Each structure stands twice: as structure tokens, then as C-alpha cells.
Amino acid sequence: METFIVIPCLNEQESLSATCTSLGFGQGADPIGRLVLVDNGSTDGTLAVMSRIQAESPPKRVLIIQEPRRGYVSARRAGMSAVLEQARVEHLSADETLVFQADADTVYLQGYVEAMVAASSGKRGELLEGSALSNREFNTKFSEFAQLCREVDTSTECWFAPEDEQVVVDDKVCAFLLADYCKWGEHQDDFDPVGRQVFAETTRLFIRAKRNGPAWRKRVEDAQALPSRRKLMTQGLGYFASSGFPRDAAWIAGWGEADEALRFLNSPRTMPTLLRLVRSRQRHQLALFGLLPALCNPEVAAPSEIAAIADELREASVGMSPGELLSQMLSLADDEQGAISEILGQR
């Protein structure tokens, strides 16, 4: 099995080296597979770090690509295009080429790549997803915030679809066959009904995959990673309110200024908006982890309240693009007087 790891990079000079080292590249290591680094218009020393990693790795094991158009879709797509070109030149089978997605500010624990490769069945339609672990040091430093997250998340789990039916994909810890990527339509820009860009590009890719089926997620618990918590330090309130699902800058800013984030992490229960924050997080979780899987697969055994909403929405959702479908879920999550709020008793 040939392997490629694609990492989009925008001003990542501080974290990129540690990420690449954790994946086995640089410092004279003998890595598994190849690394594709995509510079997305960095203005710091990211390119210099990339060049150093390339020089410290075996020849032709690190590819450096430049994509000036900003955005995860553009950067990931450029990286995937480089993989496709390499496969063409080397006559690699797309059915035997496994492509990893990684983030430049995540540290991958020992054995991550090996565990993902070992877990791959090689069958078309399989999306592998590793395990993003909670950072122990962060949780210890902000223990009250960590406890609040556990309490809120536990309160909603009874409405979630089974793990193997979940649709939301963690972009930074996933992998799929190159052949599937092409079949699923590649990474695409998607917009909501009023023209705003929708994020979560790999979740949208997987929604298209399931519509073209069969396609399924396979969790790889032994493939573990430690994501950065830097967004929490500046976007803590909005990040909590969306349960970590990517929302646009205006939405995030609507929950509070960046200088409030640290206060929220240190003493979340003192925030005057705490109840609204908690309710928003709960609604996002029901919409994304309960309702969305039921809409993508009518055979999902959803709780009766979730199933009733899915039945009402299913016919209208058939012709929706993945971006429009996600936008609908987020609109339901934002509605403080809507159907999801009623399930939670929040009206």
C-alpha cells in the first residue's frame, strides 16, 4: 500500500516541524510513505521550515506545493492534485494508494501511521478515522472548563446515532483510498443559500460518498493524535457553543471578544452567557450527531424525537448539496425556539 500524507499550511512556522517529526519526517528519520506540504500563502517562515524538513528527509519523500488561494478546500485539493499527479507519473494504483489528511498544528502519537495502514481493509468506500485525544495538560490547567464539557456532552449522548453511522468527519485524523477520493467528487467549495462558504470539507466529501454508496467510517482507536488547543485560547466561547464544529468568523465573534476566551476557560461558570452557550452546544450536537446521520441514512435507529424531525425534513433534503444540508443543520442548531430546542426542553 502506497501512502501519502497531505498537510495544508498557513503561517505554521511554530508548529509544523513538531507535526512532521511526529509523523516520521525530518531529522534524518526513515518515514513511512510520502509527505505533501501545501503552503497556502504563508507570510511567516513556514516555507523555510518546509524546506528544512524536506532536506532532512530521504530524497523525494517530501513534496512542497504552493497554493496561493486561501482556504482549506483550496489547499487540500492542491495537495490531492499533487498526489494524483505523482500516482500518474509512477503508475501507482489508485486502489492501492492510501491518502492521509493531517493538520500542521497537531502532534501524532507514535505508531499513528502504522495503525491506520494496518486498519485499512483496502476496500472501496472505507474512510478511516483516528482518535483525537484530549490534551491532559490543557485539561489540568483548565479543569473547570474540561468538567463543564464532560457534563454537557454526557447530557446529549442519548440522542446520538451509533458510532458507525456518524457522518461528521474529523479532517485532521482521517484517511481514504485515492480511488475513493476521485469517485466521491474530490474536495469542493460549497455555499449556503445566501452565498456564505460552508466549512467541514471532509464531512461534505463523506456525505457525497454516502449518497453514492456504499461508504462507511471505520474508527481506528490505536491511531492517536493530540490536536492544538490554540483556537480555544482565542475563540473559546464560540468554539464551545458550536461543539468545535467550524463556523464562520462572524458567528464566532457573536459569542464574545477574543479577550474573553481566557476568562471563559478559567472560570466558565461565572460567564453571564453560560446558559445560552450550553444550550447552543447541546443543539449543535443533536443536529450534527443525531439528526444528520438519520437524514443521510433512513435506516438509522434514531430516538423517536430525532426520527420525527428527520421524517419532516427528509423529502426536502433529497436535492440539497452537502453544503446546503449542513447549513440546514446549523440553522436548526441556532434556532433557540425550534424543534431541537423543544427536544432539549429549552423553549
Image (cartoon, rainbow, N blue to C red):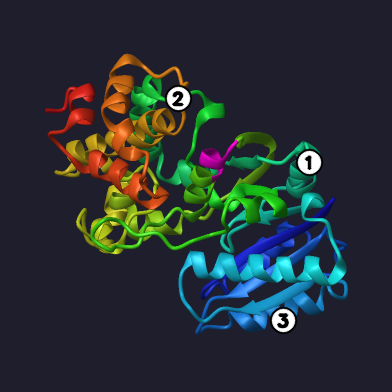
Q: Amino acid at mark 2?
A: Ala
Please tell me whether residue 238 is drawn above or below residue 119 in the rendered image.
below
Q: Kindly state the secondary structure of the residue where label 2 is placed.
A: loop
Q: Kindly state the secondary structure of the residue where label 3 is placed.
A: helix
Can you identify the residue that label 2 sits on? 161
Q: Which mark is residue 51?
A: 3
Q: Count residues near mark 3 (Cα–Cα under 10 Å), then give few for <14, some for 14-19, many for 20+.
A: some
Residue 325 at x, y percent in the picture: 35, 44
Q: Amino acid at mark 1?
A: Gly
Please tell me whether residue 298 is drawn above or below residue 173 in the rendered image.
above
Main secondary-structure element of the magenta-colored stretch: helix
Number of callouts in the render? 3
Judge left or right: residue 115 versus residue 234.
right
Residues in magenta, as a range: 209-213
Q: Residue at x 87, y 75 (%)?
A: 59
Q: Kindly state the secondary structure of the residue where label 1 is placed.
A: loop
Q: Which mark is residue 195?
A: none
Q: Which mark is residue 122?
A: 1
Quarter-of-image position of residue 136: top right
Q: Residue at x 49, y 43 (%)?
A: 207
Residue 14 at x, y percent in the picture: 57, 71
Q: Residue at x 66, y 40 (%)?
A: 125
Judge left or right: residue 334 versus residue 320.
left
Q: Amino acid at mark 3?
A: Ser
Judge left or right: residue 225 versus residue 279.
right
